[in-house]
Image (cartoon, rainbow, N blue to C red):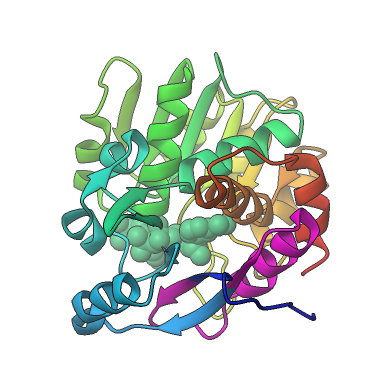
Amino acid sequence: MEIKLTNQTKKFCVIGDPVTHSKSPAIYNAMAKVLGVDMVYLCQPVKVDELEQFIQSVKLLGYGGFNATMPHKECLVQMVDHLDSDSEMCQSVNTVRIIDGELYGSSTDGGGFFHALLSQGCDPRGKNVVILGAGGAAKSVALKLVEQGVQSLVVANRSIDKAELLCKHNLNVMQGVDFQIDTLNRVMSECDVLVNCTSLGMEESAEFSTLEFLDHLPTHAMVCDLIYHPAETKLLEHARLRGLVTMNGLGMLIHQAILAMELFLGESVDRQAMEILVKEQF
Ligand code: NAP
């Protein structure tokens, strides 16, 4: 893709370790081109012990901001000057704007999942949600869905203490449970939206030992997986064959990038048009 650079071109990047596989430069540069914004978006490997030095450098070089992926999202919470409500809520930062030398941290992960659901015609508000996993992604998704007003949210995790800790956020709505098959079968019967936030099913990762819990879901339930490599996990395949509506993790990735772009620009964009454009990058 041809990018026209000027002396005023605003610089942005994604940092992480590893990060060279990232699709973010292709996504943001494509959005900038269509929106007619004078910006360039690069890929910048940064190790944990280089983060402080990186922050001083981007301030000096006049960057407009950056996105962060593993392992920087939690560390950045302590390093930015301001946190927005989402980053404060999930204690994670994936988007940083630099304005007058000050760092403004945001988290678009949970919002990205919520908007991905809406774009698939599923409004989770007032619904019963079950989340598998209690890691960083589960936390962002769970807390955003609770904030948006789901009726109930069960977090099932292999390490139940992590599920219970996460649910302390709002014990009126959230409940932490274990990952035993009997427990999963039981919680599925009342579930409207199931979200896999574990790494089970990811390429070169472990698989669920059984998917029988899917057979306990009501026929109207939607099954989501945050994984998008492979595009259809065994979980989604099993759910689809059962006739359930499914959604993989690509929508979340796309919508969190659109939300971050809106933060960088300080204005909203045509989300539907951007979604179509970004999908073309995959
Ligand atoms: P994480 O913090 O490392 O959490 C991993 C979760 O998976 C934990 O709850 C862990 O349980 C569980 N888990 C791992 N192996 C397991 C096993 N063998 N059996 C049962 N549970 C197991 O990772 P994360 O950052 O939350 O990411 C989770 C998934 O979301 C990954 O697949 C990642 O690629 C995906 N993701 C997608 C997007 C997107 O934009 N689509 C964004 C972020 C993440 P324990 O707590 O017991 O260890």
Residue placed at 40% from the left, 44% from the top? 140
**Residue 220 x, y percent position in the rendering:** 74, 25
Q: Is residue 39 a member of the stretch shown in magenta?
A: yes
In the rendered structure, the answer to whether residue 91 lies left or right of residue 68 reads: left
Q: Nearer the viewer, residue 220 or 79?
A: 79
Q: Nearer the viewer, residue 214 or 168?
A: 168
**Residue 154 x, y percent position in the rendering:** 40, 31
Q: Nearer the viewer, residue 100 or 148?
A: 100
Residue 233, relative to residue 61: is it above or below? above
Q: Is residue 210 a member of the stretch shown in magenta?
A: no
Furthest residue toward front: 7
Q: Quadrant of the N terminus?
A: bottom right
Residue placed at 34% from the left, 74% from the top? 58
In the rendered structure, the answer to whether residue 254 lies left or right of residue 274 reads: left
Residue stretch in magenta? 13-40
Residue 183, relative to residue 263: is it above or below? above
Q: Quadrant of ligand 1?
A: bottom left
Question: Does residue 232 show up?
Answer: no
Residue placed at 48% from the left, 48% from the top? 109
**Residue 115 x, y percent position in the rendering:** 63, 36
Question: Does residue 72 show up?
Answer: yes
